[in-house]
């Protein structure tokens, strides 16, 4: 099935990024200012998305929190994808004890459910943006690494790769010229899935009180703040939850399209 380019998802994702990073220039309201006369106000012209239980403007907080959530998502997904790329190529190209070590490490990580491993690590390490990026990336590289290892096996078994190795062509040149271009689609699929997974992981940790801590904020922490007043102020939890859903949905649509293109390339080469 030929999927069309998900223009709507791309435009929606770009719009959310612009809202978070450029929005404060057009809406210069502090996300930290308390206003006791504006506690739990519903959406209005003065406060487009309403206020929270401390009278803080929710739109300003969602834009500020979106920066943190997107930075954590992109940063951790990039690191995890790079770890997966390096580990997968090494295991698939060199094989031998490199591949055995890869299997042992991946199986060790997969022994524990990822989210519970995150909970364990964050419980002993004070949470911050940098710490969450490192922890989420360290616990999220295995899936893309296994896919890249499998594809690296296939590439390394091609006759022209064997000829290049026999001819003494440097490994670095073989990897950069022949492996990376073919592994690019898998890398980007893993990256897009990783961004959505990292945002959801950070949101889950923040919702449980183990993620971003005040005065900093993320979509997950804003969502957590609203659970106590959900029955009387639905907007406090609804809008950050909507942002998480829209970003995740857009990234999944883009990932599906990239995966479909990658599969069709493999089928074309097979024919």
Image: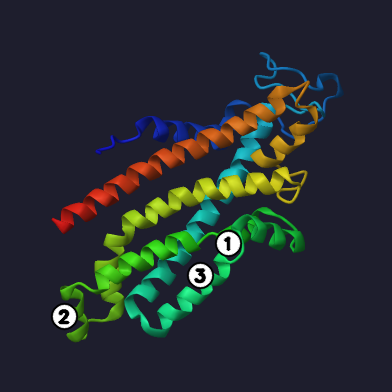
Say which mark, if any, is on residue 163: 2
The numbered mark, 3 or 1, whose residue comes first in the sequence reads 3
Category of crowding for the residue at label 1, using alpha-carbon neighbours closer than 10 angstroms: few (below 14), some (14–19), many (at least 20): some
The part of the image, by quadrant, that contains residue 203 is: top right
Q: Which residue is mark 1?
A: 139
**On-image quarter of the N terminus:** top left
Query: Helix or strand or loop: what does disc 2 sit on?
Result: helix
Q: Residue at x 64, y 57 (%)?
A: 130
Please identify the residue farthest to the left as the structure is shown.
271
Category of crowding for the residue at label 2, using alpha-carbon neighbours closer than 10 angstroms: few (below 14), some (14–19), many (at least 20): few
In this orientation, which residue lies closer to the viewer: 116 or 234?
116
Q: Residue at x 35, y 56 (%)?
A: 186
Q: Residue at x 16, y 74 (%)?
A: 160
**Marks 3 and 2, how far apart at CA:** 31 Å
**Marks 3 and 1, how far apart at CA:** 10 Å
Residue 234 horizontal/vertical position (percent):
71, 23
The part of the image, by quadrant, that contains residue 256 is: top left
Rendered position, 255 above or below 134: above
């Amino acid at each position: 099935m030929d999927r069309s380019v998900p223009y709507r998802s791309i435009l929606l994702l770009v719009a959310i990024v612009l809202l978070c990073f450029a929005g404060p220039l057009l809406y210069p309201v502090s996300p930290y200012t308390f206003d006791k006369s504006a506690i739990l106000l519903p959406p209005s012209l003065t406060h487009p998305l309403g206020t929270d239980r401390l009278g803080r403007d929710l739109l300003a907080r969602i834009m500020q929190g979106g920066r943190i959530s997107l930075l954590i998502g992109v940063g951790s997904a990039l690191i995890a994808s790079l770890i997966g790329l390096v580990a997968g190529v090494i295991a698939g190209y060199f094989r031998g004890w490199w591949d055995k070590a890869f299997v042992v490490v991946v199986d060790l990580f997969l022994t524990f459910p990822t989210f519970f491993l995150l909970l364990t690590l964050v419980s002993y390490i004070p949470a911050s943006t940098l710490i969450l990026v490192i922890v989420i990336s360290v616990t999220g590289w295995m899936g893309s690494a296994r896919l890249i290892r499998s594809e690296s096996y296939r590439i390394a078994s091609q006759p022209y790769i064997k000829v290049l190795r026999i001819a003494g062509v440097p490994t670095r040149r073989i990897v950069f010229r022949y492996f990376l271009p073919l592994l690019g689609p898998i890398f980007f699929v893993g990256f897009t899935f990783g961004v959505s997974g990292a945002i959801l992981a950070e949101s889950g940790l923040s919702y449980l009180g183990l993620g971003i801590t005040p005065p900093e904020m993320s979509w997950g922490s804003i969502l957590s703040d609203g659970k106590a007043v959900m029955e009387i102020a639905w907007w406090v939890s609804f809008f950050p939850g909507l942002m998480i859903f829209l970003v995740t949905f857009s990234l999944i649509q883009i990932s599906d399209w990239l995966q479909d293109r990658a599969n069709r390339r493999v089928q074309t080469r097979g024919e």
